[in-house]
Every structure is written in C-alpha cells, then in structure tokens.
Amino acid sequence: MTSYRQPGVVLTDRRFTVPLDHADPGGEQIEIFGREAVASGRVDDELPWLVYLEGGPGFGARRFVGTEAWLGRAVKEFRVLLLDQRGTGLSTPANRQTLPLRGGPREQADYLAHFRSDNIVRDCELIRPQLTGGLPWTVLGQSFGGFCAVRYLSVAPEGLEAVLITGGLPSLDAHADDVYRAAYPRIERKVAAHYARYPQDVERAREIAAYLLEHRPESAGHRLTPEGFQSLGIMLGGESGSHQLHYLLENAFVRTPLGTELSDTFQEAVRTANSFAGHPLYALMHEAIYGQGEEPTGWSAERVRAEFPQFDAATALAGDAPVLFTGESIHPWHFDVDPALRPLRETAELLASRTDWPELYDTERLAANDVPVAAAVYHDDMYVDTEHALRTAAAIRGLRTWVTNEFEHDGLRAGGPRLLDRLLALVRGEL
C-alpha cells in the first residue's frame, strides 16, 4: 500500500486479488485497484466504510483532487473506497492493447463475459471483509454503479449497511430493445430543447452533416461520419452539455485556399468527444449489461434506431427537418471509425450474439429487502428511463426515492454534497 496526502484527505492505494471467474475461485486471478480516502484529521478514527461504484460501464472511479465534489461530504463521516471496477482504471484494464493477451476474438469475448455487474459485486464481497473486518458497508452507486448496487441487493444484502443510488435504477426485466425504444424519444426531447435554446444550431448541424455525407475526414485515425457527428448528442444528458455542444459547433468551418472545410479545431474536439480510447468497455459491454437469459442483445440500439427514421441524417437533409443528435447508444459503426475499437470489432459481434447471460436481479429477494435504500431519480434523465427506474423503485421493499428535475444525469458531479446529504437523510429516516 502507498499513502500520500492531498488537501484535506489522506489517500491510500490498495490492490486486491480476485478470481476472474468466481465460480472457479482457484483459477485465474486478476487485480482490482481501489483508492481509500479519509479526512486528514480522522486517519486513526474507527469510521464506517463507503464504497463508490462509478457509472459506465467501462469507467474507472473518478480521480478527485482533495475534497472536491461529493467526496468532501463523504469523508466527514466515512472512510471511502473509490473502486476501479474490473477492467477499468488500474483494475486489470481491458482494451485493444491488453485483450489480445487472451487470444482471438472468441477468447476475448469469453473473458469479457465476466466483466458485468454480477462479478463486480462478487469482487466487492471479497474485498469488503479485508477492509471492514466483516462489517457491512454503504454503497454509493452512480448510473451503472447503481445497476451494480441493485445486483448487490439481489445477492448479498448481508454485506450492505445502506445503499445510495444516483441516476442508476435499472429495469429488472427489460430487454435492451425495450431500453432503446424508451431512449430514442427521450433523446429527441433533449435535442428539441437544445435547438429551442440555440436555434442557430439547427442550420449549423445541417451544414456539418451535409459536409460529412460528401466527405470523410480523418483526425488521428478517427473517421468522422454523419452518424459519428450525431452521436455528440450524448453531451445533452449532462448539466452543461447543451452549452458545450453549442460552443463545439460554432467552430465547425474555416475558409482555406481549397474552399470551406471542417476546421482542425472542430475535428479534434469531435475526435476527443467520440473516442473510446480511455473507456473501451463502455462500447464493448454497453448492451451486455442488459443481457439476461437466452435472447441476444444483437446490436439493439442499431436495430431499434430503424424504428425512428427521423434520426437518419440523409432523410433529414433531403427535406427541411433538423438533423437529430443521438447519444447513449452503441452501434456497429463505432467499431469501424474509432481506432481504439477497430481491432475489437469481431469481439463485439460475439458479445452481441451471446445467448447465455445469467439473470442479474432476484425480484423476490428485492421485494423482501430490509437494507435501507435511497435513490435520486432525475425527472427526464437522458441515460436511464425514469419510468423504468420508478417501476424498479416500487419493486424494492423500503426504497425511498427523490424524484427531481433539479439535476441531469451527472447530478452527483454537479451537486454532490447536497445530493449526498439528501440521500443519507432518506436512508436514515430523517426526511
């Protein structure tokens, strides 16, 4: 272990060994990384533990500096473990560079089948007694981290003192198709709100899409296509995303000796926004997190998109309709245009066709739950369907919700201390 200080906190880097396949505890082992954070003046105090599960899939825990955001509130009463879920951050990262160590696409897909919420929870349950001496801990799950928390409640509630969820109540039984049929109308509403705020962006987006239908520029090996441009709509699910998208679009074109072209500034910004180099599991596992039973996910977002022809850029440009942005969906073309994903295309195909996903949630156990649970549900969350979330909330005994339109999906980042205060008060029965 290595300990060091930042303003207001003492951080300790911890590494744990867990089985790749928990059904074979004596088999191959992988390393899981977590960063402990404790208030500077409370290093030697007996404090309860809180484990933070980041959103995703595919993102390591946020790297805080000192006591910024919600962490400053948490360390007032908890010893916090910022856990890099398996395959992310420093926890045996899975990407185009490391996955070939497994073998070919088939071996890679079989390996990645162990990287869903079921095994993330099993990792937590091996790590917990090493830190708490066997005592239960509190889980804070953001987005996909909330999906993991609901899995935790389904299989190991004895390890939980309380559960706090922000924007992460999954449907217990929806197929990925159901998820995306609910998602596209939400995304369309977010795009309409953006264009109402910035009406000048309607024509700007049409001009960019029209240029991309005729040209296929590249930036650092990343090919920019109309669909890739549309996927910038993922920004619209965040607190300041609409404004960021507007500023990105205003730099789109520049005059050159060869005529008007897309600017380097714009192309680099799009490449950075669209690249999965830092979180490839988001693309590889995004639909797999919904897989349950024998029905494959089968590139659900791509198939369901065909039911919403208004999202087709060429169709929009053929008339006078606005070009609609998309977001929170992964498509086969992602693995063609992104150099971080290109070598993993066949692996992604095998995951999309997989028919042996274990069930993730135990509805009977959730209905009998006695762990205190509080969840922030965002009224028009672009990433997690509100109706699905509230249906799940009603299925978990004792779960208390705070439904709010005060925050977007990244509410924990934007309003962390107050949000955490509210959820703690709910699980403690103070509200």
Image: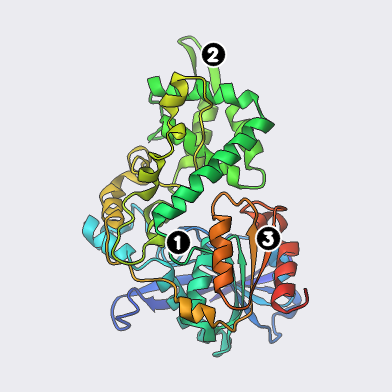
Residue 297 pos. (x, y %): 34, 55
Q: Quadrant of residue 119?
A: bottom left
Q: Is residue 430 visible?
A: yes
Between 322 and 217, the one lying in front of the other is 322
User: Which labelled disc corresponds to residue 46?
Assistant: none
Q: In percent of the image, x 63 and y 38: which residue is there? A: 242
Q: Secondary structure at mark 2?
A: strand
Tell me the residue that label 3 is attached to. 403
Q: Which residue is the extreme one toward the right?
A: 430
Point out the tag, 2 or 1, that comes first from the N-terminus. 1
Residue at (39% x, 45% y) in the render: 304
C-beta proximity under 8 Å, tags 3 and 2: no
Looking at numbered disc 3 in the image, what kind of residue is underneath it? Val
Quadrant occupied by the C terminus: bottom right
| x and y, in percent, of residue 308 in the image | 44, 38
Q: Residues within 10 Å of mark 2 (few under 14, many from 20)?
A: few
| Between marks 3 and 2 in the image, the one whose residue lies nearer the viewer | 3
**Residue hosting label 2:** 255
**CA distance for labels 3 and 1:** 30 Å
